[in-house]
């Protein structure tokens, strides 16, 4: 019997309550203060520093409790539905909690999963499976981690993460009748309004930037600051520089390749050559960079703790900004934005995004977040309508 | 010191040729004066120096001059002279004007002098004139290509009247180049990009041809593959050139250059009659091998990123940081390859993808 046939057999015997209890036990172990799983992840991951992995994983999983799992399932599964026996999950990126999330949603929906780890993070999915084997062996057979492209042809549903090109290739391979969910690469924005103390906003923004070193699609790639009164954006940029300098030792950056170091050197140099730009940066190396741009500019997005700060003359500019990023916007982090939430929602929708959240929480989406605007469980199921006679 | 005075001093050094003494004190004095001039007359570069906290009055060693990454030449016009004085500009290869760097020139005097000194020394050390067969477009067909300009000037200076460019705006002419090579009775200098040679080799192979070009023939290949042909290692390329053209490795020279630099680097294979991977650094150029994180020199013999300081770049910036990996050797530099564009290790969309979609 091949691996997927085996998974189908396991799925026919899965009990949703048993799955929730098992996942609750596993996630609780990952959240423990001295969790050996988190410690091993921090030690062996390789892309991020231990401190970033410790903080990011602990905080990221904080709300992922048994109760949250149950609530999510109850909220999403309101009518009869068919859960695909096997869901293939193609991971991308290098953020462990994103991998955990992608892996556990199909299980919660009633499916089994075969997971292909991301090329830059072979560890997260494998370690999660190991923790399931150790702490919840009753569902361990419902998960396979490996690399077999044929799964795309034979799994009953496919969830793919990656660049738009990768998603297009995988989508083309999956038979049309199967359930397919694609999550392309995106980026996020942060906006700072007038109703917030600048140091506090800068510290929250610095945390969002430092966590996962600006590699994730939830990392703010631009910081837009309402420049009223004029000069506020400059003050924010300086406060952000101080906050990033502090975090450089508290949450050190992970290892960069030479190509990444060169990319940062080039971003800095290109910014320095532009008229009207101010740079704040680490004295040695490329640890962090704040680029205060001129109002109205449209620089390249930040990366790897190098981030542009752009003054907004007026709050109405936000919607245009988001629109220019369409369809690549993911999340909009905000602080001190006095305008109604409806405005932020409209702005994020303009950019193709689906999440509005407080600054400082950008890297911690809740368990039930609608990733790319899709229902976390319903998108993985076939819903069945039963009409009354 | 005026620009003309600086140019004259650099020209005097260029006139001494590649065998001029590698005088470090002379280089440092000129480099520091040139840096001060460029800082004073190039506003974008002055902004860059200010951002990095570099003041020319405090710079005491040429190594302290801040380099500009080649990618940053796309961002601003890096010239010490007004646009109306420009006589030529060379652009880096690329797919659109948005992502191509440019070198602006208000005189070709230094560029030509450097080019002829090095080309003559390393490609024509044994001949005054030779027939050129160029697998690249002429400068007329590709006016913004520094490589075509180089081949054009070399042809005019060292080429016989039969010399010819085999690539036009319409494409290249495999039949005519193969026919001319088959008919050749005198030595030829066959010049082109590595990918052009791959196309020639493929054309020869598809016709089942193996030529034996006349004794004294030489090949100069440069520029890598850039996705324009199948890729071969250096050994494979040189081996295939030997097999299909009859040119031994001892007569094949790899040249290294870039649009942002006025000077080029050659292997002294023909000049010293010894095949080598090590390229000579002209006396008026210095190259550092640095760790890209801190821009500190790496220990001797270790690999790092190449940063060139070229006195010929009087009209732009003399310090240019490349994306090329290499190492220093006692004789010069060995270029190990181009560091790839940063590959995304996260799920954030890459800048180029975002800008392409904008």
Image (tube, coloured by chain):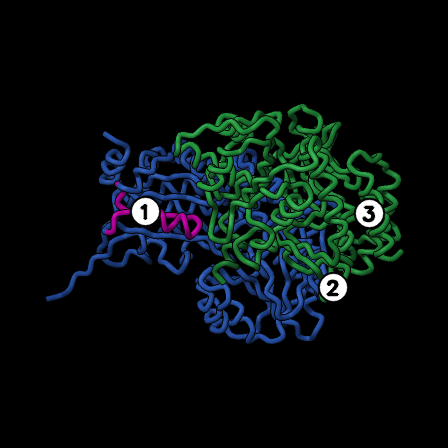
Q: Nearer the viewer, residue B217 or A212?
A: B217
Q: Chain of mark 3?
A: B
Packing grade of label 2 (10 A; few <14, some 14-19, many >=20) is: few
SS at badge 1: strand
Where does label 3 land, which residue?
Answer: B11
Residue B140: quadrant of the picture: bottom right
x, y percentage for residue B326?
Answer: 66, 35
In the rendered image, the vertical position of residue B269 relative to residue B151, given as above or below: above
Span colored in magenta: A154-176
- Circle 1 Cα neighbour tier, 10 Å, few/some/many (<14 / 14–19 / ≥20): many
- Rendering coords of residue A274 (x, y %): 69, 62
Q: Which residue position holds label 2?
A: B85
State the hue of chain B. green
**Image marks 2 and 1: residues in contact by CB distance under 8 Å:** no
Q: Residue at x 71, y 47 (%)?
A: B262
Residue A162 among those drawn in magenta: yes
Chain that is coloured blue in the picture: A
Position of the N terminus of chain A by quadrant: top left
């Amino acid at each position: 019997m091949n691996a997927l046939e085996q998974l189908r057999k396991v799925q026919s015997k899965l009990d949703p309550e048993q799955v929730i209890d098992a996942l609750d036990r596993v996630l609780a172990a990952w959240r423990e203060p001295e969790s050996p799983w988190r410690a091993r992840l921090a030690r062996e991951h390789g892309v991020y520093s231990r401190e970033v992995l410790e903080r990011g994983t602990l905080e990221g999983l904080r709300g992922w409790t048994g109760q949250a799992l149950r609530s999510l399932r109850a909220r999403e599964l309101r009518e009869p539905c068919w859960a695909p026996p096997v869901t293939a999950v193609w991971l991308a990126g290098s953020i462990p909690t994103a991998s955990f999330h992608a892996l556990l949603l199909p299980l919660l929906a009633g499916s089994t999963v075969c997971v292909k780890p991301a090329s830059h993070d072979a560890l997260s999915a494998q370690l999660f499976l190991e923790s399931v084997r150790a702490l919840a062996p009753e569902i361990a057979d419902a998960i396979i981690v490996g690399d077999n492209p044929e799964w795309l042809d034979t799994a009953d549903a496919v969830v793919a993460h990656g660049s738009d090109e990768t998603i297009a290739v995988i989508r083309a391979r999956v038979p049309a009748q199967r359930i397919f969910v694609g999550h392309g690469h995106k980026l996020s924005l942060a906006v700072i309004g007038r109703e917030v103390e600048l140091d506090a906003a800068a510290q929250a923004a610095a945390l969002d930037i430092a966590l996962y070193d600006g590699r994730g699609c939830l990392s703010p790639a631009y910081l837009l600051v309402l420049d009223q009164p004029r000069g506020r954006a400059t003050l924010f940029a300086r406060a952000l520089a101080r906050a990033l300098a502090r975090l450089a030792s508290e949450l050190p950056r992970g290892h960069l390749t030479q190509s990444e170091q060169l990319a940062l050197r080039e971003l800095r140099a290109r910014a320095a050559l532009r008229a009207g730009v101010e740079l704040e940066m680490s004295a040695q190396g490329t640890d962090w960079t704040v680029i205060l741009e001129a109002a109205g500019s449209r620089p390249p997005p930040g990366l790897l703790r190098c981030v542009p700060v752009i003054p907004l003359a007026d709050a109405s500019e936000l919607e245009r900004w988001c629109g220019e990023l369409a369809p690549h916007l993911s999340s909009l982090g905000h602080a001190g934005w006095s305008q109604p939430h409806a405005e932020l929602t409209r702005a994020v929708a303009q950019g193709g995004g689906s999440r509005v959240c407080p600054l400082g929480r950008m890297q911690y989406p809740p368990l039930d977040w609608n990733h790319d605007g899709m229902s976390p469980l319903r998108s993985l199921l076939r819903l069945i309508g039963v009409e009354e006679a | 010191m005026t620009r003309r005075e600086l140019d004259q001093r650099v020209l005097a050094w260029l006139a001494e040729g590649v065998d001029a003494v590698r005088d470090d004190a002379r280089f440092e004095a000129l480099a520091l004066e040139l840096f001060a001039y460029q800082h004073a007359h190039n506003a974008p570069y002055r902004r860059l120096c200010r951002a990095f906290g570099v003041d020319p009055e405090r710079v005491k060693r040429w190594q302290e001059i801040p380099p500009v990454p080649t990618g940053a030449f796309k961002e601003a016009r890096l010239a010490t002279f007004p646009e109306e004085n420009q006589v030529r500009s060379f652009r880096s290869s690329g797919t659109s004007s948005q992502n191509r760097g440019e070198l602006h020139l208000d005189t070709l005097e230094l560029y030509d002098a450097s080019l002829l000194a090095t080309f003559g020394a390393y490609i024509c050390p044994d001949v005054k004139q030779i027939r050129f067969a160029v697998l690249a477009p002429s400068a007329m067909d590709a006016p913004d290509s520094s490589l075509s300009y180089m081949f054009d000037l070399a042809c005019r200076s060292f080429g016989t009247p039969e010399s010819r460019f085999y690539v036009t705006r319409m494409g290249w002419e495999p039949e005519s180049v193969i026919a001319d090579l088959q008919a050749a009775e005198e030595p030829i200098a066959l010049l082109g990009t590595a990918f052009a040679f791959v196309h020639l080799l493929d054309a020869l192979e598809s016709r089942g041809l193996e030529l034996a070009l006349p004794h004294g023939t030489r090949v100069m290949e440069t520029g890598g593959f850039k996705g324009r042909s199948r890729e071969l290692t250096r050994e494979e390329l040189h081996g295939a050139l030997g097999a299909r053209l009859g040119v031994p490795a001892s007569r094949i020279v790899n040249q290294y250059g870039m649009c942002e630099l006025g000077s080029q680097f050659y292997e002294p294979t023909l000049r010293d009659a010894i095949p080598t991977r090590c390229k000579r650094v002209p006396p008026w150029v210095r190259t550092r091998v640095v760790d890209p994180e801190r821009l500190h020199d790496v220990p001797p013999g270790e690999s790092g990123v190449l940063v060139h300081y070229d006195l010929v770049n009087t009209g732009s910036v003399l310090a240019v940081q490349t994306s090329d990996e290499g190492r220093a050797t006692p004789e010069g530099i060995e270029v190990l390859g181009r560091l790839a564009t940063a590959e995304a290790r996260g799920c954030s969309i890459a800048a180029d993808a975002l800008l392409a979609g904008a």
